[in-house]
Image: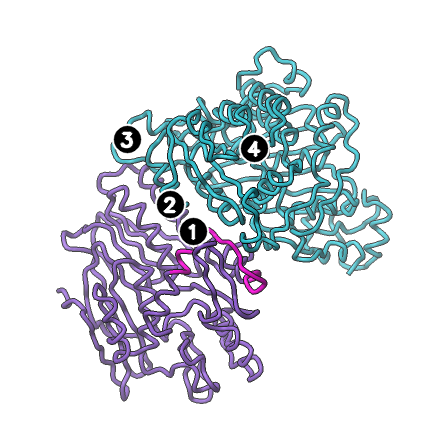
Amino acid sequence: MNPVSTTVRLHRHLAMGTEFLLYLEPAEMSETDERTLVQAVFAEVDRVESIFSRFRPASEISRLNRMAAQGPVVTDPEVFQMLSVARSLWQLTGGAFDVAMGRLSRAWGFAQKSPHMPDKEELVSARAASGMAQVVLDPEWRTVSFNTPGVELDLGAFAKGYAVDCALHLLTAQGVPGLINAGNSSLAASGEPFESGWPIEVCSPQLPSVPAQTLSRVLLHTNSMGSSGIMEQKLEQGGQTFSHLFDPRTLGAEPGEQVRTAQVLQASVLAPTAALADALSTALFVLGPVEGAAVLVSFPAMAALWVLAEEGQIRSIEHNWPTSCA
Amino acid sequence: MTKSDRELEVPASAATEILPDQPEVSNSNLGRREFLGLAAAGLGAAALGLEACKSPQSISANDWVNVGVIGVGSRAQHMMQMLLRVPGVRITALCDVHPPRLDEGRKVTRQATPGYSDYRRMLEDKNVDAVMVSTPVGLHAEHVIASLEAGRAVYGEKSMGRTLADCNNIRAAARRTGKLLQIGLQYHYAPWYTKALEQIRKGNIGQVTQINSYWHRNNNWRRPVPKGASAELEHLLNWRLYKEHSGGLFAELGSHQISFANMIYGAMPESVMASGGIDFWKDGREIEDNVHAIMRYPQGQTLAASFITTNRLEGAQERIYGTGGSIELTHTDATYFAEPWFPGSALPPEIQMQHKIVTGPTYSAEQPYHGSGKMPIKGSASDADLACVAAWVDCIRTRKRPVANEDIGWSQGVTVAMCNRAMKTGVKLTLNDFLNCSNPEEV
């Protein structure tokens, strides 16, 4: 992603374990107004992180993770709506998108950024406490409860995409063209600074045998893009590669079978919001292009692009994906 | 690990523990008289059982609390979100003179919550049991007093009031009506703060002689305004920057730390010297972008407070220095630092014995202490704002007296107003002179 324009200004902010980049085209703004808007945008990102971070003990997600196994816990409408949407996506993706995989992610060390092979006992207990089927949402009382102790909600990229959406709303409300890029995996644009949109390149991951290559070039204007890939975090052990993304439908049987091997390298999604783009890219990475295309029937407004490695070569498969721009 | 160290390890479930009783307070004449209310205040009341916040199904119909909100800005929206995590709470009315704020408030409730532009009409709404006042500081007195007189339980955001007269009037209204008033001093409800206070009162850091408090930010403290907004609307949305309604950095940032220092010392400062200026953000604002105060307490103790908007190295923290140890408090945690013994130090003998006598490289008293004995004070796995509003709801239901009651709020509000007066006049101001001044309605 490299918007080239002398009028575009870049602002940076560390949050949610990554870097948020804000590209602004503040042609008609005073320096004070621009500074104030940038502060507000990043404050909104911080607000979302303070609610949904599973690493902060005072966050609402941490409170739910601590208490919801003891009985129904009332939460606020924003959090309840996020969890309700997550549940709907879980159902619509046949379980491929699941925000209750925190316990399994921690057992593998991905949550702590120190991947390791869990022992069998740890894996059994982690699997028993993983999956949206263990989470009960009661809209009448706005409560969350877990069927079993040890469940850990982890909204991960879904919350990151939501933070991008919330922050972008401030730009839209001010009528300021801008683009927010959270760690290169969540992007959302407001306005059309170059008359046609913000140019975004989808690249293949860098592999030892194959250099990175540009697979597609699209323009974002009021839409969002999310990408999930094996290259973010992985564990290589015993000649196998394990991704930080699990297949929630199987939860795995044995180490070596339970996480996806590195055939699908990346999935990118174009969607109306960054939260949806991020949720779907995670699910489509897990599902792969065949099952993924079937799931996308429920999401006609979305487009997908998978990057695959086959016999040392890179190839891409598209679904509703726009024609590459120049 | 020493005995005193071990005692600082408290369970993470501290939020459910009973808060300690308030010890005897200072022997300052005026400070003591004015502080008796504080001493008797509800520190002995049960802290809320946040970890026990569960299903609302067990709450009887009569125990549902319907809250109306006056002033629906960013702080109110955050606190509404906290309120909606408390079982048995509904937000049933919103009031703001700026219509877009009502829509923003409805985004929080996710409902078509009734909206008012006139708070007096909202107070006629029978579907409002309790009121949260989160308007500009200069309007607190009008809105809090009207809400109390309308028979409602009130949560009033800090600072209690902008002027001495505001604070006096609000406290008098709370006493006159007998209605519940809790001031939004949420760190009085933070478990790590209450545990730190408990350790201080046990004497685990010896005699507290000095508190340094910082709330250092690096931003222009402005809020975005719509394109083409009038100066009037800009003033309304950025009210914190203009004298008409703002209490400045002492009120907006300093209230919590100043109130906590009053709590630790068990008194209000008997004198204040203060300074500040508009030295960097020269953008038309009327409120200082950096303020500093030195407050002297009746027993020869000091609070040195600094609130700035051009550097964030220190962040928001207060350091409590005792002759036998130190405690650092932030918005998320508390840390205890042992004070190493060396010949001639002020370390109390009983703490010397707890620490034992150790040998090591020559200790220089002038260097910051980086050795062993640094320990977290646990209990930070809670949100102070949530604890604070949950305690308010609990007090409404049980008729308990809040921890941050009208007396705690009065001492905080008056101290802040005193800092602003001292900064304005540039002279050392005593509490006696301030309380008896001829212009209490002025900043």
What's the distance in space between the residues labelled 2 and 4, CA to CA?
A: 23 Å
The image position of residue A234, as x and y in percent, is 42, 77
The image position of residue B434, as x and y in percent, is 63, 17
Q: Chain of mark 3?
A: B
Q: Nearer the viewer, mark 1 or mark 2?
A: 2
Pointers 3 and 1 within a single chain: no
**Residue B330 vertical position relative to residue A156 in the rendered view, above or below:** above
Pointers 2 and 3 within a single chain: yes
Determine the residue positioned at 41% across, 45% down: B109
| Callout 4 touching callout 1 (CB < 8 Å) | no
What's the distance in space between the residues labelled 3 and 1, CA to CA?
A: 31 Å
Q: Chain of mark 1?
A: A
Q: Mark 1 sits on what residue? A: A77
> Of the numbered discs in the image, which one, if any, rests on residue B153?
4
| Callout 3 touching callout 4 (CB < 8 Å) | no
The image position of residue B242, as x and y in percent, is 42, 25
Q: Nearer the viewer, mark 3 or mark 4?
A: 4
What's the distance in space between the residues labelled 4 and 1, CA to CA?
A: 24 Å
Q: Chain of mark 4?
A: B
